[in-house]
Amino acid sequence: MKHIKTLNRPVLKDVDGKGCGECQTSCQSACKTSCTVANQECESKTPFKPIDSADASRI
Amino acid sequence: MLHAYKFKDENIILDVNSGCVHLVDNVVFDVLTKYGEDYKASVNSGIPREVIEEIDELVSENMLFTEDDQVTKTMLTGRDAVIKALCLHVAHDCNLRCRYCFGDTGFYFGERSLMSLETGKKAIDFLIEKSGARRNLEVDFFGGEPLMNFDVVKAIVEYGDMAAKKRGKLIRWTMTTNALLLDDEKASYLNETMDNIVLSIDGRKEVHDNMRPSSNGKGSYETVLKNIKHMRDVRKGKYYLRGTFTKHNLDFSKDVCHLADMGFPNISMEPVVTSDDVDYRITKDDLPAVLGEYEKLADICLDYAKQGKQFAFFHFNIDPSQGPCVVKRVSGCGAGTEYVAISPEGDIYPCHQFVGTEDFKLGNLSDVDCFATLAMTEISNDCHSGPVDACHSGPDPESIFQNKLYDYFNEAHIYSKPACMDCWAKFYCSGGCHANAYFSNNDILQPDEIACALERKRVELALGIWAVSEIG
């Protein structure tokens, strides 16, 4: 496409086999620093991990 | 529903219901923002047909103007009533006297108390018993200050690991601590046992000491910083620094940088949650300043990445190409349904924020049979004829966590919250914090307006940072 660049697939439309509940609890309260549910992980996919000491620089 | 906005030099279109992120040129941006779903009408204004064809293609592939129809209310209300996470208040006591503490400087409006090992074991048994078929469980040691009851923490972990293993389950342990007692021995222990550690520090010395004095009235910054630096040096797994900003430090990006520049890679800085009658409360008038600070933080993240510095701001850690499934995003945090908090006395509440609020007390660990009785009643109500045993083919009522507020919380998903229905950010915040909504508006279905404004800004910036990094 010349005018539009799509960066990701429609990840929210797939519900087959979803909602298993095995994922981490996503407390939205400010005191727990777990507020944004979208940065939680799906147990059945490659996790999106925060930086640990072994990681290279990233955002 | 679309959300269209500009980030740096990019025009970003978020197709809300599919989660697709598109970068578009100025022509497409103008067409979509002016015409919306009636975009084909733009040809009458001289828009090239190829533009319409590109939009058509995305629409046909369910990547633009998609409907919000993938999750039904039945999917949400029909979930198993099981617990998978506990917040264990092992200490209702604290060695700090933080001025903004929602837990009444650790006492939670009650007596100073520490959880006994006996109560801790009961809590673990309760979690495992009521977790149904869930394998992955979580326990967060919380307070007050959990390290004030360190020996009990260790004994609970030992007991819990054994108990979980016997039932084929896994408990992930976490701790939220102010780090004041985090000596070498405790740091080593936490490093070995905790899946995640949250360390509280507010940033610059003057900012931290102003709001987080010790019980003797002196500042705690120097000791806390020394201890978390040691934790940083020994830690092999996840950990976060977590700070609070108030009206007194609306320039909180400086506090984040203060910590990042000392080599702490994962940082969260949260707005203070408090009552109306304090001078450090964030108000609507502060929103422009706070939103501006988030923009500064986005610039800092991009700049640090260019320089090769390790730094991630918690709220910008969003990857739209993955993450939790849509069912999870719709259903919210699970407070009162799959997550509960337990006080040192064994009282059970929907979450840590409700601890001490009598109307939200669900029961006590000494009387867990009441939950099975409620579960039987629920099953019985679902069966309109015949004996319960004959019609019930689901999980054992003993393993179900039915409680008096279960339906109240289970139905508090984004489709029950009028403010969320038309909000483009609903799949990123899941409707926000129930407790924040309740204490702001006396209604868990009415999210706090200021929290929503901050969340929308953070999500915009997070998606923008991700988009920019994707295109290099």
Image (cartoon, grey):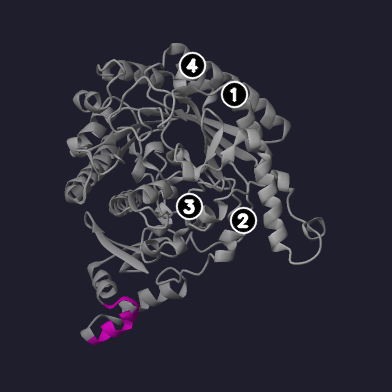
Q: Secondary structure at mark 3?
A: loop
Measured from the top left, where is residue B83 in percent x and y? 60, 43
Marks 2/3: CA–CA distance: 13 Å
Callout 4–callout 3 Cβ contact below 8 Å = no
- Residue that appears at 17% across and 46% down: B289
- Residue that appears at 50% across and 46% down: B335
The disc label shown at residue B332, or none: 3
Measured from the top left, where is residue A14 in percent x and y? 54, 62
Q: In this image, B167 relative to B109: left or right? A: right
The answer as to whether the residues below labels 2 and 1 share one chain is yes
Let me know if residue B330 appears in the view. Answer: yes
Q: Residues within 10 Å of mark 1 (few under 14, many from 20)?
A: many
Marks 4/1: CA–CA distance: 17 Å
**Relative to B63, residue B443 above or below:** above
Instruction: Answer with mark 2 or mark 3, whichever residue precedes in sequence.
Output: 2
Q: Secondary structure at mark 2?
A: loop
The disc label shown at residue B79, or none: 2
* Quadrant of the image occupied by residue B266: top left
Instruction: Answer with mark 4 or mark 1, whichever residue precedes in sequence.
Output: 1
The answer as to whether the residues below labels 4 and 3 share one chain is yes
What's the residue type where badge 1 is placed?
Answer: Ile
> Which residue is labeled 1 in the image?
B156
Measured from the top left, where is residue B202 in percent x and y? 28, 30
Foreground pick, B419 / B437: B437
